[in-house]
Image (cartoon, rainbow, N blue to C red):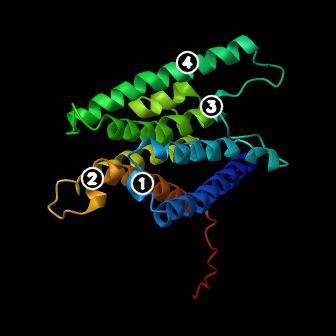
Amino acid sequence: MGVGNKTEQRLLLSYCSFTCIYLPGILTLVKFNDNLYNVGKYKFLPVLMILTFAEVIKLLFPMLQAEAPTIIKIEQRVSPKAKKSWSKGLKEVVKFLVTALVLSMVYYVMIVLFGAPVLTDHEETTMLVVTLITLTFVSTSLHLGVDSALDILTGTYSQKGSILTEALRLNIQATILGTWLGATVIPLDWDRPWQAWPIPCIIGALFGYLIAHFITLVRMLPAPKLHRKVHR
């Protein structure tokens, strides 16, 4: 295993460790502050902003590595002399915002097709859409760029060899799966307040996102060396 690959593993290990620390803390605070039932309201937006800010903080982690190239946009490395102009940076921001808007509409339509209320609960459905956009598109775009994020979301990303890409793909899959599993408890006849739309879906998405990071964290941990004596 090359030095670069080992460094990428250490960086990904730090990324996942960071998420596995701060996200349970945020969920615990939401629970004990009696804000669990507000996850489907606009009051939950500050929490999603914290999640986005945490992903931005992760972009600074490679600066702490003394030896290695960053894994940010590892598939799109350019020469050290190349610098993005202000116009190109603005173009990327506009592309990000437009893509996020279009993807939000796609998410909204898909959620409605899966059974969400059409004429009511617009705030709740919108918050589920914003949560999914934050956990799937925003986090992936920050690390790989808009184009690669879209390729992963649409399943057309074919390039292999990046452990970061595989980890982000797992994050997206686990988030969507958690959302779907959360929806299964809504129609059950338990009459619990946390079954209200879309609380189980948002909580399921957050737990799916967290579990994906935990799985990647376990995978990135150095395997113990087993010394076995060979008896002849």
Q: Residue at x 65, y 27 (%)?
A: 76
For label 3, the residue is 75
**Sequence-earlier tag: 3 or 1:** 3
Q: Is residue 188 left or right of residue 45?
A: left
Measure the alpha-carbon separation of dots 2 and 4: 35 Å
The percent coordinates of residue 222 (x first, y second) are 64, 66
For label 1, the residue is 208
**Sequence-earlier tag: 3 or 2:** 3
Front tag of 3 and 4: 4
> Circle 3: is it few (<14), some (14-19), or many (20+) Cα within 10 Å?
some
**Sequence-earlier tag: 1 or 2:** 2
Farthest-out residue, left: 189
Q: Residue at x 19, y 39 (%)?
A: 115
Measure the alpha-carbon separation of dots 1 and 2: 19 Å
For label 2, the residue is 196
Question: Which amino acid, mark 3?
Answer: Glu
Secondary structure under tag 3 reads helix
> Circle 1: is it few (<14), some (14-19), or many (20+) Cα within 10 Å?
many
The image shows residue 76, relative to residue 64, as above or below, that is: above
Q: Quadrant of the C terminus?
A: bottom right
For label 4, the residue is 95
The percent coordinates of residue 144 (x first, y second) are 59, 33
Secondary structure under tag 1 reads helix
**Sequence-earlier tag: 3 or 4:** 3
Question: Which amino acid, mark 4?
Answer: Lys
Quadrant of the rendered image containing residue 220 = bottom right
The percent coordinates of residue 70 (x first, y second) are 73, 40
